[in-house]
Amino acid sequence: NIATALSTIVVMAFIDVRLTIISLAIAPVFLLITRRVGAIRREISKLTQQSMANLTATTQETLSVSGVLLTKTFGRQSEAISRFSNENESLAALEIRQQMIGRWFFMIISVFFSITPAIVYLVAGRAIIGGGTDLTIGGIVAFTTLQSRLFMPLGQLLNVHVDVQGALALFDRIFEYLDMEHEITDRPGAITLEPATVRGDVVYDHVSFQYDVPIDTEDAETTDLANRLALDDININIKAGQLVALVGPSGAGKTTLTYLLPRLYDVTSGAIRIDGHDVRDIKLESLGEIIGFVTQETYLFHSSIRDNLAYGLPNATDAELKAAASAAAIHDRIAELPDGYDTIVGERGYKMSGGEKQRLALARVILKDPRILILDEATSALDTHSERVIQHSLETLMRDRTTIAIAHRLSTILAADQILVIDAGRVVESGTHSELIATSGLYASLYHEQFSNADRREHELATFS
Ligand code: ATP
């Protein structure tokens, strides 16, 4: 376009410099307007992207399995529909504005280019009639023809500027994410531990941790929250192969304590060591191999049971898959399904029952065979049979590996080598079940509150069955 425009202008200037200047006199005004239109397009592109992100988030949130369930059970379908409609309409309006922006401007340019030949005929015609020029009629016709050829390349060049501005708004948004700093990365010289040689000793050495809460200085409550330590001077020594049960009231810091070991967060002060190595000196990938995490809520991918299990060990053979599933007491159930291990579990595993999902999660970790296991026991009550089955799978899983369990099952607590009672970010009591009961402290009162009933229920159900 630049080549065509320049060559046309040069030839026009050869024919008549004065007419060329008249033809191009208004061009600087167009350039200014183009810059302005480009800036507006950039702004609208940005808004359109935000609106699109909102719409996608709303759709994903509402149409996810849990979202649909929540919407239906709370009778909020019409609200969900109107929320979608509003966002959809605002996106549509923005898209239209984005397409329309500058159309009037290009319309003015095209009108201008259509009428300039008439001006040229007028000015040049009068000059020829007046006899004050050596321009010929042929020259004028050649000039106006060239002039009409100038419109396309110039118009397109101006358009490119506006389009580029719109595209830059997308880049701004992409770079917002690409430029984000990773908070937790491998240190230079971080080491890889060979999983087979890891013993599994875990030490928390004067560990304190504070969540990064954005402070609103006006609001005393958020300032207070930001200054509060989620964990305060935690010292724990776990020997390889031991089972440690964490108990304590809600919000005490149990989950936070477990998150620090695989470096989901880094300690604020103190250190955590595995076999004497500070976790910050171990490569994140290596930590991921050594540590297995079973979360309270099982996350399954929308894929086959085989794929979900093999996430723990990508090259697992069929025999290994079956062995892990048998150890987690889920193999027989899978075998009953029409497609067996190829059954698609549905988004987040909605086609499986709660107990089945838990056992699949256990099978996945058994397959991974980590040296250190973090177990956040599900609080949801299962029937006695499923409970026993899971209990059995858990025992298989915890055997011979260091386990830190956020314990909700009495059997796990009773089997623990150490029970740590966490309250307000501190270890307030530690010992075995009988030692802690004897001290009549927080553990004893939690135990009486939570488990004496559960104990009785278990007994009743056992008698009943
Ligand atoms: P529960 O038994 O109810 O799961 P918990 O003992 O596991 O509780 P944590 O989840 O470790 O407790 O939370 C400890 C404290 O840290 C709580 O006061 C909680 O509000 C706060 N907290 C947890 N996660 C965050 C976060 N991402 N940002 C800020 N504060 C957090």
Image (tube, grey):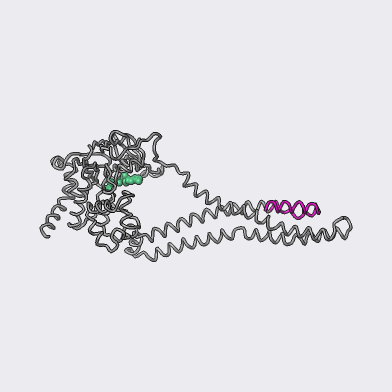
Q: Residue 322's spot in the image, x, y percent?
A: 25, 54
Dominant secondary structure, magenta: helix
Magenta-colored stretch includes residue 28: yes
Instruction: Locate residue 333: give its quadrant.
Output: bottom left
Give the residue displayed 42% in from the left and 60% down from the top.
59
Question: Which quadrant of the figure contains the C terminus?
Answer: bottom left
- Which of the two residues, 305 or 281, is positioned nearer the viewer here? 305
Q: Residue 27's spot in the image, x, y percent?
A: 71, 53
Residue lying furthest right: 131
Q: Residue 103's spot in the image, x, y percent?
A: 62, 60
Instruction: Locate residue 442: give its quadrant.
Output: top left
Above or below — where is 98 with respect to 196?
below
User: In the displayed structure, does residue 321 sit left or right of residue 384?
Assistant: right
Res. 251 in view: no
Magenta-colored stretch includes residue 375: no
Count numbered badges in the picture: 0
User: In the displayed structure, does residue 143 sit left or right of residue 452?
Assistant: right
Above or below — where is 418 with respect to 55?
above
Give the residue displayed 10% in from the left and 58% down from the top.
463
Q: Residue 430's spot in the image, x, y percent?
A: 20, 39
User: In the displayed structure, does residue 207 sit left or right of residue 32?
Assistant: left
Res. 334 in view: yes
From which residue to which does the magenta span run? 1-29
Above or below — where is 227 with respect to 136?
above
- Which of the two residues, 431 or 348, is positioned nearer the viewer here? 348
